[in-house]
Amino acid sequence: MKTKDVLSKAVVYGREAEKVLNVFRHNIHDDAKVWEELVYCLCTPQTKAVNALKAVEELTGKKIMNLPEVASVLRSCGVRFHNTKARYIVDARRKFPSILREIRMVDDVHVLREFLVENVKGLGWKEASHFLRNLGFERVAVIDRHILRYLLANRLVRKRPKSLSRKTYLSLERKFIEHAEKLDVSPALLDLLIWASAVGEVVK
């Protein structure tokens, strides 16, 4: 997917994408929203966004935190690896006060992401970046398959990496952010436009 094709979609998806980003900017001030975004990002790996969103709604509505019940909800919503992710969610709930404190106190998004990767089971570099992006931190990149295809299509990278180590992730993110800056758009907005161009709707 070439840059010109993605930018041409800004006419269709740009306004909706900006609305989503504005919601993200307010999420960080609401404890409940922070928790919902954390659960969502713990559920999304190898799971459709719509299924992860459904799981968040179910868990939020029922206030369920018992491990077997959480696993049951995830399974019923179509979240893959439901037992493992249920353990991640229960563990994250236990740590949530300290997670929330770090989010509110640490201004440096890179320091904050390091903290999340090291302290929250189930949050790798992509998931931690996704979580922070959904809390309004716009200078991070969610390096997923869509972004990798975009980087390759526009010759910003020469080949698809075999794995996303810390070093590789940060290198790809830097290229993506520099590219977004040249286009005079935020990395977060470009991310949403790439996703929308690929799937036909703005997805968080």
Image (cartoon, helix red, strand yellow):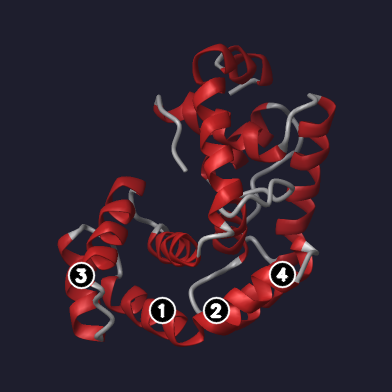
Give the alpha-carbon distance from disc 4 to disc 3, as whole Å.
30 Å
> Is disc 1 in contact with disc 3, using a CB cutoff of under 8 Å?
no
Residue that carries the numbered disc 4 in the rendered image = 112
The 10 Å Cα crowd at callout 3, few under 14, some 14 to 19, many 20 or more, is few
- What amino acid is labelled 4 in the image? Leu
- What amino acid is labelled 1 in the image? Tyr
Tell which tag, 2 or 4, sits nearer the viewer: 4
Which residue corresponds to the image point at 41% horizontal and 28% vertical from the top-left?
201
Q: Secondary structure at mark 1?
A: helix
Q: Is residue 117 above or below residue 9?
A: below
Q: Secondary structure at mark 3?
A: helix
Which residue corresponds to the image point at 55% horizontal and 34% vertical from the top-left?
192
Tell which tag, 1 or 3, sits nearer the viewer: 3
- What amino acid is labelled 2 in the image? Val
Which residue corresponds to the image point at 65% horizontal and 28% vertical from the top-left?
153
Q: Upstream in the sequence, badge 4 or badge 3? A: 3
Which residue corresponds to the image point at 36% horizontal and 48% vertical from the top-left?
49
Dot label at residue 88: 1
Residue that carries the numbered disc 2 in the rendered image = 120
Coordinates of residue 177 in the picture (x, y in percent): 78, 41
Coordinates of residue 180 in the picture (x, y in percent): 76, 32
Q: Quadrant of the N terminus?
A: top right
